[in-house]
Image: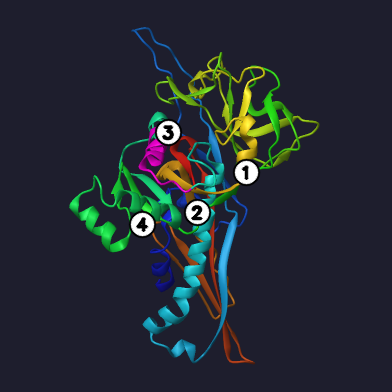
Amino acid sequence: MEALDVLENTDAAARIVNREYSDQFKFGGAVLGQTLSIRKPARYLGRLGQSVNIEGITESFVPLTLAFQRGVDIQISSQDLLLRIDEYRDRVLKPMIARIANLIDQDVCLLAQGLSNFVGTPGTTPTALSTYLSAKTTLDNQACPMDGERHMILNPAAESSIVDTLKGLFQSAEEIKQQYLRGEMGRSIGFDWAMDQNIYVHTVGTLGGTPTVSSGNQSGSTITTGSWSSTTLNAGDIVGFFSSSSPTNSVNPQSYQDTGQMATFVVTATITDSAGTIAIPLAPSIVGPASPTPSLQNVTNLPANSAAVYVFGTPAASFSTISAKSSPQNLAVHRDFGTLAMVDMPLPGGTDKAYRAASKKTGNSIRVIRDYVATTDQFIQRTDVLYGVAVLRQELGCRVGG
């Protein structure tokens, strides 16, 4: 319980992400590699008038795999076990759990690699509130709920920059006080702001050529493109497609209205061009207005033949300015953009001690096993957590380049 208590109070990203799916794995029976299919909310077109228009229930699923078993193992003497609990907590437990919590937080921050919305300039720390307002606009256009669960999670450089820029402008007196005392943003422009040292850093692929879409009206999770030159697209790169006569813009998922913004998609696997051609694996799947499942429409038009391919919102003609740049991927997200599911691990027999503690409030679960080595009068103690992370709804998250 002491270990669980320490875990409950660490790291920003892991605290804010959705945790409701932890209990969908069987109590004490989950194993590394087990996968759960998480149902996403269905979408409907609706109707106008009195005549009934029956719509099918089109459901989609996101796989959540228990891919991570993290832990710290130590050897302690029988004398260490005589320490008072507060001494043991400070000297032994806190450093162990801090490392486990940090690893969990890194895995949550890595979910940024699966988000397709992007604002900012790769390689440049945002200095103006307008960059974050652009992220807000992106989420608004995607019908992100305004229910108090929006969060802005920044790396130290981005947080320092925006706190210095604003210096309490347009804040309540209490928020200004906390900015001064803690050097933190608090709540602003509809987001709760937090700093996280584990923000994912993305490196743009090695880019070249003036790429275009190879043939028009492609849909789905792969788009064939050509005219690349010595190019590697990295998993996590963001692409868009532009034609002045038939733009591929995003649509509001509730109203299906054109947002006026280029639709962007994340590259799901690292891939290198072959003779100038790349079949780009991307997410979300491109669904146009004439799709068999029109309720899932996410673009105004399918990419046109010879449409220009953009990477990170920059035109192909400017690839040399961003190729191979590394950029912190700060997060502007709703809590339901992703999930962290931590599950109960089985308790083995034949040990000196085996304990498991779980929190109904947060879904955290931690296991501690201790064995005695008689020849050295030492105890081997292992501490384990088992969990998985997944992007649930890409439209509820936006990366802010740093």
Q: Is residue 391 visible?
A: yes
- Mark on residue 361? 4
Q: Report how far apart the C-alphas of labels 2 and 4 lie in the structure.
A: 25 Å
User: Closer to the camera, 3 or 283?
Assistant: 283
Mark 2 or mark 4: which is in front?
2
Residue pictured at 44% horizontal, 57% vertical: 156
Disc 3: CA contacts within 10 A as few (<14), some (14-19) or many (>=20) = many
For the residues bearing labels 2 and 3, Cβ distance under 8 angstroms: no
Name above or below for residue 378 compared with residue 41.
below
Discs 3/1, front? 1
N-terminal of the two: label 3 or label 4?
3
Front disc: 4 or 1: 1
Residue depicted at 46% across the width and 17% down the height: 55
Q: Amino acid at mark 3?
A: Thr
The residue singled out by tag 2 in the image is 199
- The kind of residue on which mark 4 rests is Lys
| SS state under label 3 | helix
* Span shown in magenta: 125-137
Q: Which mark is residue 12?
A: none
**Is 17 on the left-hand or right-hand side of 177?**
right
Where 239 falls versus 332 (above or below)?
A: above
- Residue located beneath label 1 in the image: 204
Q: Nearer the viewer, residue 150 or 185?
A: 185
| Spatial separation of the CA atoms under disc 3 and disc 4 | 31 Å
Of pointers 3 and 1, the one earlier in the residue sequence: 3
Residue lying at the far right in this picture: please name it.
Answer: 275
Residue 366 lies in the magenta-colored region: no
Residue under numbered circle 3: 138
Displayed quadrant of residue 238 = top right
**Of helix, strand and loop, which one carries label 1?**
loop
